[in-house]
Image (cartoon, grey):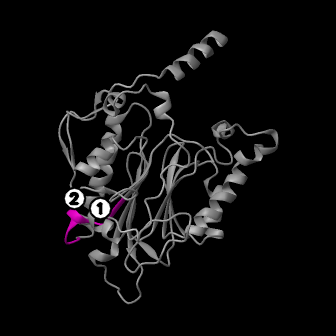
């Protein structure tokens, strides 16, 4: 499997959390009345055309007879199998290339039946959202914000022709800014969630927009302690919060909806005795790259570990 240090998260609102009965993977998700199943997957650029570096992301390094494992065709076959097995109503993907999107992901429609699709309008690394129109339909045009893609769905029910609050689900597909950009990631999250709240209140006229059914998923490019997650879970973030030793906001920002919970680890979700699923395919690397000490010190004032420094010195001595 590929290794990756980015954090993939799925946050759900309080009402949505009540519908999360259990999470298992890889297995077909259960069909629960009035509930929405969502799969989030960072497929990693390069796809078939743009980029070349995926072979470098395998540990141990691929041997000569294993090079095909890092090709898009091989990876696409694995994606087709896994996504088809899980059979979610909605699939949120990150890191698709606009140069080859239609060809690379034709299998989503042709083989798996995802006949609804929206790809983010700009950028090299784009999110895209797929859905099955026999299960859900768009209740509002998709909304493209700063590295977030909001789709609002209504459950398809032939016996109910008028939308109600229980029919609507809001799905925010995110690929937040990478690097030392904690402030921008918070702003991106504020904008995305606020857009969902305003859609619920001003366009769909839901009775309780502060408790809308919202799923925020994707690649947050931050850990559990980052500002974007703090904002969602605590419901407020201010200038006293530091990420990478810097403020993420110059003033207090308040979540317009009830605080959210992490779908992978929240205690309030009934999984029928099944333990929380893993959120990383392989062990994370930050604990190796950053010097030890307390979690707070390592996160707020990170310093390279001796292992990394030794390797940097060796690289410099060899190539400088």
Residue 91 sits above or below residue 278 on the image: below
Residue 320 sits above or below residue 245 on the image: above
Mark with earlier residue (2, 1): 1
Give residue 86's position: percent from left, percent from top. 55, 68
Residue contact at pointers 2 and 1, CB within 8 angstroms? yes
Residue 208 forms part of the magenta stretch: yes
Image quadrant holding the C terminus, namely: top right
Residue 300 sits above or below residue 35 on the image: above
According to the picture, the residue beneath numbered tag 2 turns out to be 258
Query: SS for tag 1?
Result: loop
Badge count? 2
**In this image, 288 relative to 236: left or right?**
right
Give residue 181's position: percent from left, percent from top. 37, 33
Residue 53 sits above or below residue 42 on the image: above
Give residue 288's position: percent from left, percent from top. 50, 31
- Residue at the spot x=38%, y=90% of the render? 159
Q: Dividing the picture into quarters, in which one does residue 150 lie?
A: bottom left
- Label 2 environment density (alpha carbons within 10 Å; few <14, some 14–19, many ≥20): some
Residue 21 forms part of the magenta stretch: no
Say whether residue 47 is visible.
yes
**In this image, 73 relative to 95: left or right?**
right
Q: Which residues are magenta?
A: 206-215
Query: SS for tag 2?
Result: loop
User: Which is nearer the eye, 119 or 278?
Assistant: 278
Between the C-alphas of marks 2 and 1, the distance is 7 Å
- Residue at the spot x=32%, y=65% of the render? 17
Q: Dividing the picture into quarters, in which one does residue 157 lie?
A: bottom left
According to the picture, the residue beneath numbered tag 1 turns out to be 13
User: Which is nearer the eye, 312 or 91?
Assistant: 312
- Label 1 environment density (alpha carbons within 10 Å; few <14, some 14–19, many ≥20): many
């Amino acid at each position: 499997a590929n290794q990756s240090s980015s954090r993939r998260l799925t946050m759900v609102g309080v009402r949505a959390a009540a519908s999360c009965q259990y999470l298992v993977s890889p297995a077909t998700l259960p069909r629960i009345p009035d509930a929405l199943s969502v799969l989030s997957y960072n497929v990693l650029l390069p796809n078939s055309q743009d980029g070349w570096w995926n072979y470098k992301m395998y540990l141990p390094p691929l041997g000569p007879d294993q090079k095909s494992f890092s090709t898009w065709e091989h990876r696409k076959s694995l994606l087709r199998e896994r996504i088809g097995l899980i059979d979610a109503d909605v699939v949120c993907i990150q890191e698709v290339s606009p140069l080859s999107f239609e060809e690379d992901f034709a299998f989503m429609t042709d083989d798996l039946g995802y006949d609804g699709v929206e790809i983010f309008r700009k950028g090299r690394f784009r999110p895209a959202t797929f859905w099955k129109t026999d299960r859900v339909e768009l209740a509002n045009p998709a909304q493209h914000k700063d590295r977030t893609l909001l789709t609002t769905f209504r459950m398809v029910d032939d016996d109910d022709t008028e939308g109600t609050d229980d029919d609507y689900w809001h799905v925010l597909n995110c690929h937040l800014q990478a690097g030392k950009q904690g402030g921008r990631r918070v702003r991106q999250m504020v904008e995305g969630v606020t857009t969902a709240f305003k859609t619920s209140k001003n366009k769909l006229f839901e009775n309780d927009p502060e408790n809308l059914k919202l799923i925020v998923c994707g690649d947050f490019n931050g850990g559990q302690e980052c500002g974007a997650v703090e904002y969602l879970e605590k419901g407020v973030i201010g200038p006293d919060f530091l990420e990478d030793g810097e403020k993420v906001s110059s003033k207090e920002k308040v979540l317009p909806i009830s605080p959210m919970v992490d779908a992978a680890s929240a205690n309030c979700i009934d999984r029928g005795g099944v333990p929380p699923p893993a959120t990383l395919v392989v062990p994370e690397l930050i604990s190796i790259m950053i010097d030890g000490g307390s979690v707070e010190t390592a996160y707020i004032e990170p310093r390279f570990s001796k292992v990394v420094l030794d390797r940097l010195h060796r690289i410099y001595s060899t190539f400088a």
